[in-house]
Image (tube, helix red, strand yellow):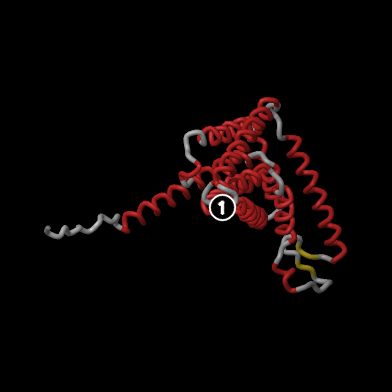
Amino acid sequence: LPCLQKGPSPVAPVHLVNEESTDKTNLGFIHAFVAAISVIIVSELGDKTFFIAAIMAMRYNRLTVLAGAMLALGLMTCLSVLFGYATTVIPRVYTYYVSTALFAIFGIRMLREGLKMSPDEGQEELEEVQAEIKKKDEELQRTKLLNGPGDVETGSTATIPQKKWLHFISPIFVQAFTLTFLAEWGDRSQLTTIVLAAREDPYGVAVGGTVGHCLCTGLAVIGGRMIAQKISVRTVTIIGGIVFLAFAFSALFISPDSGF
C-alpha cells in the first residue's frame, strides 16, 4: 500500500491572535474609562469635595487650590483602584455580580435621595463647607501671628527659621489636600472606584477616574461660587442614580468572562 502522507496541520497565524488580544484589551480599557469618568462626574458634581474646591478658589490662589485638591483626588483614585484590583484573587464571576448588585443599590439609593430632595438642596452642605474652611482660616491666622509676619500663600516667615521643605509647601496647598482627602475617604465616589476596579480594566478605571475628578475640580475652581450655587444637587443625584442603574442593567447582557 502506498504510504499516506499527512499534510501540515492548519495553525492559526500568531499575528491574528495577537491582534484579537490587543483589540480585546483596548476595548476593556475604553469601557472602563467611560464607566469611571461617567460615575465620577455624577458622583462629584455638587459633592462636598466640589464645594471645598469652589470656596477655597475664591479665597486663595486657584492653581494652588487645584494642585492640592487634584493631588488628593489622584492619590485617592490610585488607592481605590489598588483596593479593587486586590479583589481579583476572587473568581471573576463572583466579583462581577456582587459589583453589579452594588451598582444597583447605589443607583436605587441615589434615585430615592434625589426624589426626596428639595430643589435648593445642597445649600446646607455649601454652608457646612464654608464654616469648615473659615475654621481652618482662623487656625492659619493664629499660626501666622505666632510665627510672625509672613505670606499666607507661600507660608514664608521672617522671624522663625523653618525647615527647608516647608518653604516649598504652601499652607493653602496642604489645606486643600487635607480637606479634599478627608472628605473623599469613604465617599460614594471612592466606593464606586473600588467596585469598578474589581470588574473593569484597572488602568482604564484609574485614568477615567482621574480625568473625571480633573473635570469636576477644574469646573469648581474656575466657576467658584457661581457654579456651586447654580448646580442642582437634586438633578445631578437623579441623573447619577440613572447612570448607576444603567451600568447594573447592562451586566445582564454582558458575560463576566467577556473581558471587560
Of the 4 image quadrants, the one containing the N terminus is: bottom left
Give the residue displayed 87% in from the left and 64% down from the top.
146
Nearer to the camera, 126 or 71: 71
Give the residue displayed 70% in from the left and 27% down from the top.
117
Residue 37 appears in the figure: no
Of all residues, the one furthest to the front in this rendering is 1
Determine which residue is flagged by label 1: 206
Amino acid type shown at disc 1? Ala
Please state the horizontal and vertical placement of residue 139, each as a whole percent of the image.
Answer: 84, 55
Please state the horizontal and vertical placement of residue 5, each as a whole percent of the image.
Answer: 17, 59
Give the residue displayed 67% in from the left and 36% down from the top.
229
Q: Is residue 160 left or right of residue 91?
A: right
Give the residue displayed 43% in from the left and 47% down from the top.
27
The image quadrant of residue 75 is bottom right
Q: Is residue 255 left or right of residue 63?
A: left
The image quadrant of residue 4 is bottom left
Nearer to the camera, 67 or 83: 83
Total marks placed: 1
Please state the horizontal and vertical placement of residue 173, each as a whole percent of the image.
Answer: 70, 58
Nearer to the camera, 151 or 201: 201
Q: Residues within 10 Å of mark 1 (few under 14, many from 20)?
A: many
Residue 134 appears in the figure: yes
The vertical placement of 166 against 38, above or below, is below
For the residue labelled by badge 1, is the local secondary structure a helix, a strand or a loop?
helix
The vertical placement of 98 against 64, above or below, is above
Please state the horizontal and vertical placement of residue 191, each as a whole percent of the image.
Answer: 66, 45
